[in-house]
Amino acid sequence: MVKVKAIFLFYKKLMVPSLLFSILIGVFSIYMSGQFSATSFGLSYLLLPLLMHYFIYEVRNKNEYFFYHNLGLSKLSLWISTLIISLLGAVIISILTWIVYRQIVY
């Protein structure tokens, strides 16, 4: 249970900036193409947490990995958890935005 809490603590720093940038990319794609694309929003949320992970933890705060290592999480397990959580989030976001868009349009 401690490892799950540590993973969510780790991912919390990635979630908000990734979600905000995904919204911006979604709005930009609406502006550029003239129509809404749930896949662009979901795909951006799939890729942005990985980029945020790299910039926040690999470039900016390298020493923070020691905190998670002391909790029993390796760097590889943190990367895999970021990938899995962002994949699940992207699927959920894509489905929800598609449903909401269909409700608005029809």
Image (cartoon, rainbow, N blue to C red):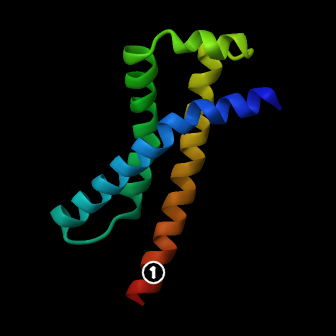
Give left or right: position of 35 versus 85: left
The answer to whether 93 is drawn above or below residue 7 in the figure is below
Give left or right: position of 102 versus 28: right
Q: Position of residue 52 (x, y in %)?
A: 41, 31
> Could you tell me which secondary element the residue under label 1 belongs to?
helix
**Crowd rating for badge 1 (residues with CA inside 10 Å; few <14, some 14–19, many 20+):** few
Q: Position of residue 75 (x, y in %)?
A: 59, 14
Instruction: Determine the residue located farthest toward the right in the rendered image.
Output: 1
Q: Residue at x 47, y 68 (%)?
A: 97
Q: Residue at x 47, y 70 (%)?
A: 98
Quarter containing the C terminus: bottom left
Q: Residue at x 46, y 45 (%)?
A: 16
Instruction: Determine the residue located farthest toward the bottom in the rendered image.
Output: 106
User: Which residue was labeled with disc 1?
Assistant: 102
The answer to whether 7 is drawn above or below residue 61 in the figure is below
Q: Amino acid at mark 1?
A: Arg
Q: Position of residue 24 (x, y in %)?
A: 29, 54
The quarter of the displayed image where residue 80 is located: top right
The quarter of the displayed image where residue 68 is located: top right
As rendered, which of 18 and 44 lies closer to the eye?
18
